[in-house]
Amino acid sequence: EQPRRLPLRGQWGLWCTMPTLFVLAGADAPDKTDVVVKKVQEYVKQATEAVKTAFTTVHESEAAQQARRWLSDNANLVKQQLARLKEQLAELWKLTPTA
């Protein structure tokens, strides 16, 4: 089964904006290629900033903070359980007769 892809918020905007930029900038004229390139670069920069903002918002969300706390707490619990098991095994090893 293939993993599900989350829809990108501006995905349709990208497919609609790019052709519009080419038409508005006159992409068919070789002397206006630089204009198109600059507009595309500007659009990509804005899209990148939007994605960074979205990731920051998710990272700082209450749900994400709760998940990190839960993982941290349970990791400490697992470490404590393993330390206890190690001690018990060491005691058991001492009690076993050597051949």
Image: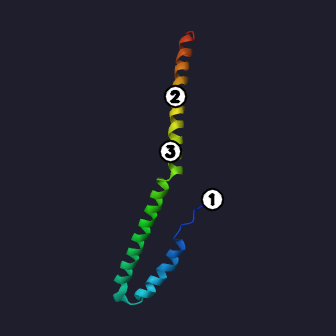
Give the residue pinned by disc 2. 80
Frontmost residue, 66 versus 89: 66
Give the residue pinned by disc 3. 68
- 55 relative to 87, above or below: below
Q: Mark 3 or mark 1, which has the lower sequence index?
A: 1
Frontmost residue, 5 versus 67: 67
Secondary structure type for disc 1: loop
Distance between mark 3 and mark 2 Cα atoms: 18 Å
Secondary structure type for disc 3: helix
At horizontal 51% and vertical 31% (from top left) the residue drawn is 79
| Quarter of the image with the C terminus in it | top right
Q: Nearer the viewer, mark 3 or mark 2?
A: 3
Q: Position of residue 13 (x, y in %)?
A: 51, 75
Q: Position of residue 96 (x, y in %)?
A: 57, 12
Question: What residue type is disc 3 on?
Answer: Arg
Distance between mark 3 and mark 1 Cα atoms: 27 Å
Residue sticking out furthest to the right: 1
